[in-house]
Image (cartoon, rainbow, N blue to C red):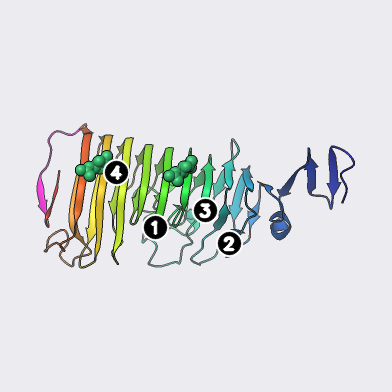
């Protein structure tokens, strides 16, 4: 095709503006066509039931923008509802965007494993990329996962599963980052019913200005199987009305290691159980009792973690660990 004017209209959907290709994806059938471009605008898209919005193998350097409300059909399946892979990508939500999974159609208070099968919501496996400004609403179970990601800056994400409070939306983990390297997650918010942020493997992870409400706190652990978690810093964050605040955990009867883990300047407000917990036997039949599995935790720093609106600090032995 030739570019005869500033804007050329081809097949009803392809816009060429100043030489950069931009495709507006409004109907799911256009997906393969959209992926041939390096600027994809996903606008008010309805994704059919039981299929992934498959943004895998995007061209290097692609920008994806989410505009308006993205919705998904209902089916019992494992998901993910959205999957993105590629290199040097920019994944951005335009002001007012909403990825609305309408998880209330699946929630039954029994979590990911029981009753209805529930799809995971969003999965990215990307390198040298930026993910910013996405608003997620009512994930059926785990919301945002960036496993095997490298050199990724994630910012201004919102996870809102408030409609599922009091256990209805159990297992709606906010952010999961595993087997990843050099990741920053900043200026983000989660209201959910499980871990706000969790990592079980990876290195050079910085979480800053994260606000967590309603869930199970921020967890740094190891998935076992030899998985190491190294150089993880969580700072300048706030955990409100969660079951626990800061949770450092290692599994029972598994192998792995934690090294250079820092929590700095964390405000804990109205935590229901423990402000800080460190334990070495998650999964033990007698948990939180029972013997811990020997497991190296090296250079764990917990600095300036403040708990508010509590009459007294509790202290209780938990396996080899302690909880405050
Ligand atoms: C870490 O990732 C950022 C992008 O978020 C990049 O600018 C930086 O160069 C990366 N650092 C290393 C050591 O690769
Ligand atoms: C402990 O970890 C911090 C980063 O969390 C690092 O700056 C410091 O050098 C480490 N200290 C030792 C003794 O390894």
Q: Position of residue 211 (x, y in %)?
A: 37, 37
Task: Judge left or right: residue 241 versus residue 191.
Answer: left
Q: Position of residue 21 (x, y in %)?
A: 75, 46
For residue 174, say whether it is visible. no
| Real-space CA distance between mark 1 and mark 2, rounded to the nearest whole angstrom | 23 Å
Task: Judge left or right: residue 13 versus residue 99.
Answer: right
Callout 2 secondary element: loop
- Of label 4 and label 1, which has the lower sequence position? 1
Q: Name, please, the residue furthest toward the right.
A: 4
The disc label shown at residue 179, or none = 1
| Real-space CA distance between mark 4 and mark 1, rounded to the nearest whole angstrom | 26 Å
| Real-space CA distance between mark 2 and mark 3, rounded to the nearest whole angstrom | 17 Å
Image depth: mark 4 or mark 3 in front: 3
Callout 4 secondary element: loop
Against 43, residue 140 (above or below) is: below
Image depth: mark 1 or mark 2 in front: 1
Q: Are marks 2 and 3 in contact (CB under 8 Å)?
A: no
Image depth: mark 4 or mark 2 in front: 2
Q: Which residue is mark 4?
A: 242
Which span of residues is magenta-colored?
310-318
- Of label 1 and label 2, which has the lower sequence position? 2
Residue drawn 63% across and 55% down? 58
The disc label shown at residue 126, or none = 3
């Amino acid at each position: 095709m030739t570019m005869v004017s500033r804007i050329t209209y081809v097949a009803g959907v392809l816009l060429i503006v100043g030489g950069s290709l931009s495709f507006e994806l409004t109907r799911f059938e256009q997906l393969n066509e959209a992926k041939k471009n390096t600027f994809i605008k996903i606008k008010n898209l309805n994704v059919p039931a039981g299929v992934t919005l498959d943004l895998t193998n995007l061209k290097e350097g692609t920008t994806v923008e989410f505009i308006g409300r993205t919705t998904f059909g209902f089916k019992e399946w494992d998901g993910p509802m959205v999957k993105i892979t590629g290199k040097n990508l920019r994944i951005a939500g335009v002001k007012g965007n909403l990825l609305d999974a309408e998880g209330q159609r699946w929630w039954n208070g029994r979590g990911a494993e029981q009753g209805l099968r529930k799809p995971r919501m969003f999965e990215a496996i990307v390198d040298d990329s930026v993910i910013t400004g996405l608003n997620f609403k009512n994930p059926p179970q785990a919301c945002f996962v960036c496993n095997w990601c490298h050199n990724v800056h994630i910012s201004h994400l919102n996870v809102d599963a408030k409609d599922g409070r009091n256990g209805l939306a159990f297992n709606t983990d906010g952010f999961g980052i595993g087997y990843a390297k050099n990741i920053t997650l900043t200026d983000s918010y989660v209201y959910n019913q499980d871990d706000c942020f969790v990592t079980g493997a990876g290195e050079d992870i910085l979480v800053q200005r994260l606000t967590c409400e309603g869930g199970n706190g921020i967890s740094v652990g190891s998935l076992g199987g030899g998985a190491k978690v190294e150089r993880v810093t969580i700072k300048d964050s706030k955990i409100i009305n969660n079951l626990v605040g800061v949770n450092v955990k290692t599994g029972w009867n598994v192998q792995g290691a934690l090294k250079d883990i820092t929590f700095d300047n964390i405000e804990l407000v109205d935590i229901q159980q423990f402000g800080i917990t460190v334990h070495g036997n998650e999964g033990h039949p007698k948990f939180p009792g029972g013997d811990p599995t020997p497991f190296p935790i090296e250079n764990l720093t917990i600095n300036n973690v403040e708990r508010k609106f509590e009459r007294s600090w509790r202290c209780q032995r938990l396996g080899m660990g302690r909880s405050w």
